[in-house]
Amino acid sequence: MPLSCSCDYGDDTDWYVYPPGDYSEMPQFKRRKRCASCVALIDAGSTVAKFRRDRCPRSDVEEAIYGDGPTIALADQYLCETSADWYFSLFELGFECVMPDENMRELVREYAQTFTLNTQSQPRAIPASAGCSR
């Protein structure tokens, strides 16, 4: 999905993602997890960004299994430190619709190609108006 300053998914979403406010430490699991963005293996104790996810029940059977709560918890997604750095940078620039399973490297590359000056005589610089206005 390309960079966007606004997002409207309506009520027709597969799941809901709750972005982290800051970095956290990767908990110990039986098996290592992969970064949702770059698919690198993440070791326990590493610095990560943790994204909580949940979704609405899709049938009466799911409601009976998981209870009458409004949502069903899904497995958390994690970003490695590098991908988390890029995610937080894009978020600070106003791109609030970045999902953890998107390739952060490609999104940063798209940002650089879209919002930097491309002149031969000067080094590439980011204009003051780059990013989304808040």
Image (spheres, rainbow, N blue to C red):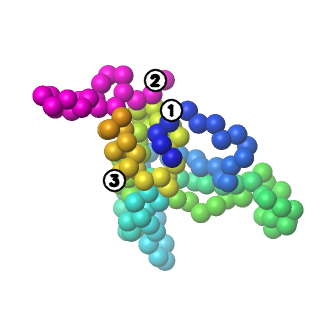
Question: In the displayed structure, would residue 67 be above or below residue 31?
Answer: above
Q: Nearer the viewer, mark 1 or mark 3?
A: 1
Marks 2 and 1 in Cβ contact (< 8 Å): yes
Which of the numbered marks, if any, corresponds to residue 5? 1
Mark 2 crowdedness (10 Å alpha carbons): few <14, some 14-19, many ≥20 = few
- Does residue 133 lie above or below 43 as drawn? above
Residue labelled with disc 2: 133
- Residue type at numbered disc 1: Cys
Q: Earlier in the sequence, mark 3 or mark 2?
A: 3
- Magenta stretch: residue 122 in it? yes
Magenta highlight range: 115-134
Find residue 25 and report its image quarter: bottom left
Q: Give the residue displayed 85% in from the left and 67% down from the top.
A: 61
For disc 3, the marked residue is 82
Q: Quadrant of residue 126?
A: top left
Tell me the mark number nearer the camera, choosing from 3 and 2: 2
Q: Is residue 70 shown above or below 121?
A: below
Residue at point 79%, 59% (across, down)? 58
Ranked by sequence position, the earlier of labels 1 and 3 is 1
Residue kind at label 2, given as amino acid type: Ser
The three-letter amino acid code for the residue at tag 3 is Thr
For this orientation, the residue located farthest to the front is 120
Say whether residue 105 is left or right of residue 69: left
